[in-house]
Image: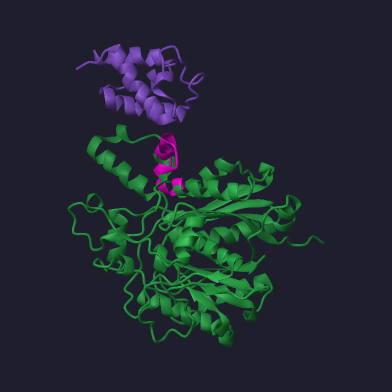
């Protein structure tokens, strides 16, 4: 069953929090993964792997580079699930 | 002509089956406690495991490290980082130019739990679920690399691998890094995290593990007539090595001096020591020569003594053969009786025991020896600590590994 954007954000925030140690409420739509959350490429790929698993979607490498912000990822995952 | 610097120990760190740090570990060792326990039912699963006990960490690393740290490091690296943080703080968090700072941290087995878990994931859920950090976690130099990052070491990060001699060889290499002028300070030691059903099955298959399943605490009994193999342990130990000049300049507290290292290889058999002990004797002799000392200076030996039927006696005979009558004034301790065998961490933890023994003038006890092997011709410290005489004395820490690797370190009092 597809999740709502709110549910995807909550789930993604948990994954990012596990990977980075940031509190989940720091993971909000407008934050940039690299500039605001200080996530390097290896951590980003780890987050993508967990997100694919959690939301049962596939995020190809060529699309990952377009996911600059948390909001980008939430929209992508929500659409991919639809 | 430049002189070779003396190398001293200014910081100690460890996480072991006896305690989460050096102080608690040492206190438990002096009290003769066992760190060996029965493994949980969850761990043992439905298999009929040939061995159902091990010496697991007293304080699991996930109680000390942050969640993200535990997710990106294999347990072997986690333990090394825990030990490094303690050692570095213990040394007074010295201000050192990163170009003059080294990291030498060994593991005998490497990131085996990461390998096994990733393969399980792949088998059950496919290749896309294998995590990106898998390779940096599984590689055997991973603990060394994490320690390098932790302290900002740019003079070199190394991971020498020689099975159960790895931790001692790392300290020997750190000593040489300072002696040859590559570094002023080196964090050196060893780590292991191989308590998993597969390695237990594999070691049991080679008939090297004790199968005393009804008496885990009594299973590691070096030199006892009923010894039947080693007990698998885990943990890490690191020391901060420093040129004596560098340590004096900053007024650092000095525990002891690493006075010499001796290395040899048996070229005899993959897993059995040369029964004549030629390689072991050569390593100890060259360590004493390297330290500029004679056999009469030695008052304490921390034996490799893993509690195997063959290995313990070969070592004891090697010690007697090299030291001759001087062996009569040596207190022999076999601390694996309490800690189990930390494999790549063993040589480093036993170096810390040797350093503490000289610093506190107390040789730690050997437990579980109810009937000493009649062929043991050395003065084994049993059950309670033994005083080490005051004055300038030396101690030897022996470490030997599968493959015929022999490492002896000579420690002298500060």
The residue sitting at the right extreme is B1
Residue visible at 50% across and 76% down in the picture: B332
Q: Which residue is at a point 49% across and 61% down the rendered structure image?
A: B26
Q: Is residue B348 left or right of residue B257?
A: left
Q: Which residues lie in the magenta part? A: B62-78
Q: Does the magenta stretch include residue B61?
A: no
Whether residue B75 appears in magenta in the rendering, the answer is: yes
Quarter holding residue B290: bottom right
Nearest the camera: B220 or B76? B220
Above or below, comparing residue B375 to residue B138 in the picture: below
At a point 47% along the width and 16% down the height, the residue shown is A32
The tint chain A carries is purple
Foreground residue, B63 or B108? B63
Instruction: Report the chain shown in green.
Output: B
Report whether residue B295 is seen.
yes
- At 77% from the left and 62% from the top, the residue drawn is B3
Which quadrant, please, contains the N terminus of chain A?
A: top left
Q: Describe residue B280's horizontal placement relative to residue B94 as left or right.
A: left
């Amino acid at each position: 069953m597809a999740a709502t954007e709110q549910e995807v954000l909550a789930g993604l925030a948990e994954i990012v929090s596990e990977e980075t140690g940031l509190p989940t409420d720091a993971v909000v739509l407008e934050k940039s993964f690299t500039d605001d959350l200080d996530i390097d490429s290896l951590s980003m790929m780890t987050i993508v792997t967990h997100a694919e698993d959690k939301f049962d979607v596939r995020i190809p490498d060529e699309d990952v580079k377009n996911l600059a912000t948390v909001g980008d990822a939430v929209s992508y995952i929500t659409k991919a699930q639809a | 002509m430049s002189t070779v610097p003396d190398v001293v120990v200014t910081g100690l760190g460890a996480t072991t089956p006896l305690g989460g740090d050096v102080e608690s570990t040492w206190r438990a060792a002096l009290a003769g406690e066992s760190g060996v326990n029965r493994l949980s039912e969850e761990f043992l699963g439905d298999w009929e495991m040939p061995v159902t006990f091990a010496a697991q960490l007293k304080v699991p690393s996930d109680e000390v490290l942050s969640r993200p740290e535990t997710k990106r490091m294999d347990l072997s690296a986690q333990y090394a980082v825990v030990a490094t943080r303690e050692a570095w703080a213990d040394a007074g968090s010295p201000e050192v130019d990163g170009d003059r700072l080294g990291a030498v941290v060994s593991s005998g087995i490497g990131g085996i739990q990461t390998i096994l878990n990733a393969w399980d994931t792949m088998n059950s859920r496919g290749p896309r679920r294998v995590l990106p950090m898998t390779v940096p976690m599984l590689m055997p130099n991973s603990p060394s690399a994490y320690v390098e990052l932790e302290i900002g070491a740019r003079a070199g990060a190394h991971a020498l691998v020689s099975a159960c001699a790895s931790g001692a060889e790392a300290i020997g290499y750190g000593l040489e890094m300072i002696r040859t002028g590559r570094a002023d300070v080196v964090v050196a030691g060893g780590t292991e995290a191989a308590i998993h059903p597969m390695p237990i099955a594999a070691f049991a298959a080679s008939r090297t593990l004790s199968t005393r399943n009804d008496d885990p605490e009594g299973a590691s009994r070096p030199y006892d007539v009923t010894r039947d193999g080693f007990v698998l342990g885990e943990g890490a130990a690191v020391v901060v090595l420093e040129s004596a000049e560098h340590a004096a300049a900053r007024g650092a507290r000095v525990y002891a001096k690493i006075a010499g290292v001796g290395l040899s290889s048996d070229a005899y058999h993959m897993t059995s020591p040369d029964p004549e002990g030629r390689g072991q004797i050569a390593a100890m002799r060259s360590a004493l020569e390297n330290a500029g000392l004679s056999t009469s200076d030695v008052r304490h030996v921390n034996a490799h003594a893993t509690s195997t039927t063959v290995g313990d006696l070969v070592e004891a005979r090697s010690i007697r053969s090299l030291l001759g009558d001087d062996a009569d004034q040596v207190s022999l301790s076999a601390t694996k009786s309490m800690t189990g065998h930390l494999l790549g961490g063993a040589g480093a933890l036993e170096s810390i025991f040797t350093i503490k023994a000289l610093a506190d003038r107390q040789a730690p006890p050997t437990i579980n020896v109810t009937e000493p092997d009649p062929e043991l011709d050395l003065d084994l410290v049993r059950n309670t600590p033994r005083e080490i005489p005051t004055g300038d004395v030396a101690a030897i820490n022996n470490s030997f590994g599968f493959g015929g690797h022999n490492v002896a370190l000579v420690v002298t009092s500060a």
